[in-house]
Image (spheres, rainbow, N blue to C red):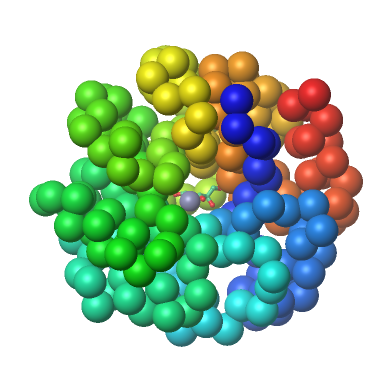
């Protein structure tokens, strides 16, 4: 099993003081998860590459593109903004290989994600190329939703196929659901409202970590 990584999702943070918010979680975070929504693939819209560029942190930025058919130039914006990894959605791209290859060509980690109802089968052909797979544990678009247990079957199957691959979960993660996902085989844990919804962020991240022991 690869290393456990904690990735606070800033979707639930206060954007008006984003760098202060990130400072509070930096020490205990392996990645900072940044959700990009286009109003097409998912109804809401969020921040853009300029916002990502304004983030000042040494923690690698994990950019989750909930975006319909992101073009090379669109992706380039996030690469130039300092993304460490970029995740695209299988459902959002006609041929996800185009985006995966472009991301990798630019020496950024490439990941592919599937929504709760999308079968693992749809991404099996990319498993040898990507650096990470994101199994959504809620419908993408909003923070604060309830973790969907049935997504765990995909994680179990994926972990059997790829013992060393980073498998990320995103949506409804708290110490209890993180443990469920960890037992299924996930090792990268995104948490938004669970972390930024609380006052003492270090305390809640520590709680998350101790549930994985
Ligand atoms: C939802 C986003 C998540 C979101 C998770 O579409 O991809 O990253 O911020 O929020 P919580 O942890 O509150 O479910
Ligand atoms: Zn996300």
Residue 114 appears in the rendering: yes
Residue 148 placement (x, y as % from top left): 47, 26
**Where, by quadrant of the figure, is residue 157 drawn?**
top left
Q: Is residue 172 left or right of residue 204?
A: left
Residue 146 placement (x, y as % from top left): 53, 32
Residue furthest left as drawn: 94
- Which quadrant would the N terminus be assigned to in this image? top right
Residue 194 placement (x, y as % from top left): 69, 44
Q: Is residue 172 left or right of residue 115?
A: right
**Where, by quadrant of the figure, is residue 186 drawn?**
top right
Q: Is residue 36 left or right of residue 198?
A: left
Q: Is residue 108 above or below residue 171?
A: below
Residue 12 appears in the rendering: no
Q: Residue at x 74, y 69 (%)?
A: 21
Q: Nearer the viewer, residue 44 or 79?
A: 79
Q: Residue at x 76, y 62 (%)?
A: 26
Residue 137 placement (x, y as % from top left): 47, 33
Q: Residue at x 21, y 33 (%)?
A: 125
């Amino acid at each position: 099993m690869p290393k456990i990584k904690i990735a606070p999702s800033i979707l639930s943070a206060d954007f008006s003081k984003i760098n202060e918010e990130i400072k509070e979680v930096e020490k205990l975070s392996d990645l900072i998860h940044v959700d990009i929504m286009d109003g097409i693939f998912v109804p809401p819209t969020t921040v853009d590459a300029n916002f990502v560029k304004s983030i000042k942190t040494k923690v690698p930025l994990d950019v989750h593109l909930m975006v319909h058919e992101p073009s090379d130039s669109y992706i380039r914006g996030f690469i130039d903004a300092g993304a460490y990894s970029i995740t695209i959605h299988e459902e959002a791209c006609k041929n996800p290989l185009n985006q995966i290859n472009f991301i990798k060509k630019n020496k950024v980690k490439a990941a592919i994600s599937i929504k709760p109802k999308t079968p693992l089968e749809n991404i099996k052909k990319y498993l040898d190329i990507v650096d990470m797979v994101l199994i959504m544990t809620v419908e993408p678009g909003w923070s604060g939703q309830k973790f969907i247990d049935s997504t765990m079957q995909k994680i179990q199957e994926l972990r059997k196929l790829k013992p060393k691959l980073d498998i990320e979960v995103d949506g409804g993660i708290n110490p209890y659901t993180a443990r469920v996902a960890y037992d299924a085989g996930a090792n990268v844990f995104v948490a938004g409202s669970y972390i930024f919804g609380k006052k003492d962020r270090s305390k809640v991240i520590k709680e998350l970590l101790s549930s994985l022991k």
